[in-house]
Amino acid sequence: MRQIILNLFLLTSSFCLAQETDIQLKNISDTILNPKRILKVSEPLDGIKTMQKLFPGNPYHFADKNNFISWKCKACKPAPFLDVNGVEGDQLFPYTEGVATRLLANIDYKDSKGNQFKILAFNHSVHDENGLQTGRFSGGLLGLAKFAKNGNLWEMRSFQPAVAAFGAFAQCPTPKLIEIGEDQFAFTLLHVNGGAGGPFEGWLYLVAGFDGKYQPIMEVDNYQLTNVQSIQWSGTYTVMNDNAKKHFRDIIVKTTGTFNKALKAQDEFETNVPEEIAVMAKTKKSFNFEIERRYAFKGKFYKMIDKPIVKFSNVK
């Protein structure tokens, strides 16, 4: 028993010491962030090792899978980026305080000709001496690198260190691959945020390559709502494959949810209901609902077309 206690003590002590590591910032060259830089990686491509080639700072590997690269670029000219939280003030990257970069996803896919690709997605947050990610209403800054397989090599075809910031506590949600046209791939991100104890509202974003860079080209509100007793909803999306459009095909978003007026007394905060069900929420005690919205690419952004289709069930 004493040996077990001693082992547990040593394990705990080692963990605490790891978390108390003095995290140092490594200054890197401004050429590192050049979107036209060339990088070739031998098969198999390791996401963590490749991230370190892209951002050659100091690597840290904590016991709680908090793995990141800490770096700073004194010669870089910080440029503004979008944070979908609407944070006030200038949002500039690279951060003057330093940067912590983490691997978000290592995504594999093939096109219709069998060509193999990898997308590495990164999360940038402001350097923290304890390796933390903080800021309730600050998103994690998404970065992307695309590789194509050529024999036994993976060649980087595009590199965008900073796209836009999503999520809360400087933690970007994991992007999910979606095909929106013939061999045209993009990413969806479920952005969720809200005040402490209040409703957690979710928006659906679509990020795609357009005008020579990755950028958000669709924003869908009322996609998700949780942490509320009287009403909740969640969404799904489908790409319309009717062969009418080769690229930027229409996207159908369906939101399904429930409403129960009797539970409003348990809600700590007032919640705005979607306008499509507002009348029913005033006149009925409870019901289930489904809202279907269709989005089409118009100019540079997806916009809702036609009127939403609304269905109710179990109305009381």
Image: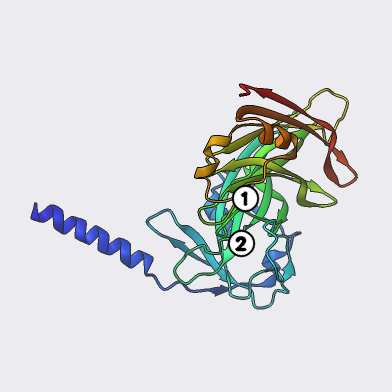
Residue type at tag 2: Ser
Examine the rendered structure and indicate whether residue 45 appears above or below residue 37. above
Task: Residue under label 2, please give it.
Answer: 138
Q: Could you tell me which secondary element the residue under label 1 belongs to?
A: strand
Mark 2 surroundings within 10 Å by alpha-carbon count, few (fewer than 14), some (14 through 19), many (20 or more): many
In this picture, residue 303 sits left or right of residue 102: right
Q: Which numbered dot is residue 121?
A: 1
Residue 55 % position (x, y): 60, 63
Earlier in the chain: of badge 1 and badge 2, it is: 1
Q: Nearer the viewer, residue 225 or 86?
A: 225
Give the residue at x 47% y 57%: 67
In this picture, residue 182 sits left or right of residue 66: right
Give the residue at x 52% y 50%: 268
Residue 130 appearing in the image: yes
Residue type at tag 1: Ala
Residue reaching furthest left?
1
Residue 312 % position (x, y): 68, 24
Residue reaching furthest front?
283
Disc 1 to disc 2, how far (Cα)? 18 Å
Residue 87 % position (x, y): 68, 64
